[in-house]
Amino acid sequence: QLVSSCADEGWELRLHERVDSTNAEALRSLSGGTQSPVVVLAESQTAGRGRRGRDWVSPFAENLYYSLVFRLENGAAQLEGLSLVVGLAVLQSLRELGVSSAGLKWPNDILVNGKKIAGILLELTGDPADVCHVVVGIGINANMRATDEAIDQPWTSVALELGALCDRTALVTVLNRRLGECLRLHREKGFSALRAEWEANHLWQGCSAVLTSGAQCIEGRVLGIDNQGALRLETNDGERHYSGGELSLRLR
Ligand code: ATP
Ligand code: BTN
């Protein structure tokens, strides 16, 4: 079922027991000269990575550690809004499995009642002006229940939310389909085609928040996002738009 659900999207599947990081493994797979998109799935990661060099806790056989690597046929322009599009596909997948109260936090966190259920890490390789590839790394907490996992912020899992074990094969099957649909729409129509749905699911719409970028903090009210996926913030100096991988949003 896993193989055929990837094949339906034209993606090749590579399954591993244990890797350092599925993103790292997906990047290595490029050196083999593969042409079609590749999905790397692992039962565990010894060095799962999050944004800004943080660790992603990845116990064996409990969760989903998934990376899809593909060539950017339209160059780096195709990156615009991509991480938000992936977040939307993950959200749709969780909802389809019954996690109805999941929502989005800009740029690409998926939360349930303030607790993180999934994370997304995009990595780019190659020349953005010429041939480049992107790795879309997705971690979804499927069956993680242990309270002794060393995670320094609130988290939850599909199993904790539903009160029943999560079938990880079903989760991958839904994710492949939702991701395939969202990526197709994004490639053909651009981010603006998905903006309204993204905004409708943004948990912090209208909230007062603080945006940090390195040592800089910007306070304002969250107005939403623009057609490029940048955050629209109402600040003391008027409406400002922010984008970039190192930005982090907190409630005030
Ligand atoms: P931001 O709000 O800027 O996105 P963040 O606090 O969510 O920041 P990220 O870098 O996006 O941080 O995610 C990495 C963080 O996620 C880790 O520092 C850890 O706190 C948390 N984390 C690690 N593993 C897991 C996991 N399996 N489930 C939920 N959260 C995790
Ligand atoms: C974050 O919220 O900081 C992003 C976490 C991304 C975790 C996933 S798990 C699969 C893929 N492989 C990695 O090493 N990271 C991503």
Image: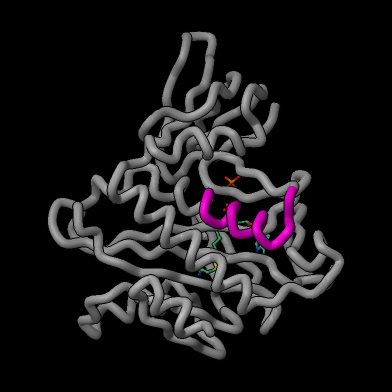
Q: Quadrant of residue 80?
A: top left
What colouring does the structure picture have? one colour
**Residue at 36% of width from left, 34% of height from top?**
228
Q: Quadrant of residue 122?
A: bottom left
- x and y, in percent, of residue 106 in the image: 55, 39
Extreme residue toward the top, this view = 237
Residue extending farthest left: 130
Residue beneath the point at 50% across and 88% down: 16
In this orientation, which residue lies closer to the viewer: 149 or 194? Answer: 194
Q: How many marks?
A: 0
Give the left or right position of residue 69, taking residue 107 as reference.
left
Taking 127 as reference, is 213 above or below it?
Answer: above
Q: Position of residue 8 (x, y in %)?
A: 40, 75
Find residue 133 and report its horizontal and vertical position in percent. 27, 64
Q: Is residue 98 magenta?
A: yes
Magenta span of residues? 88-100
> Is 130 left, or right, of 212 in this rendering?
left
Magenta span contains residue 207? no
Q: Say which residue appears at 57% left-offset and 79% top-offset.
A: 45
**Image point (76%, 59%), residue name:** 156
Image quarter in which the C terminus is found: top right
Return the residue found at the far bottom: 17
Magenta segment, prevailing SS (helix, strand or loop): helix
Picture coordinates of residue 232 (x, y %)?
48, 24
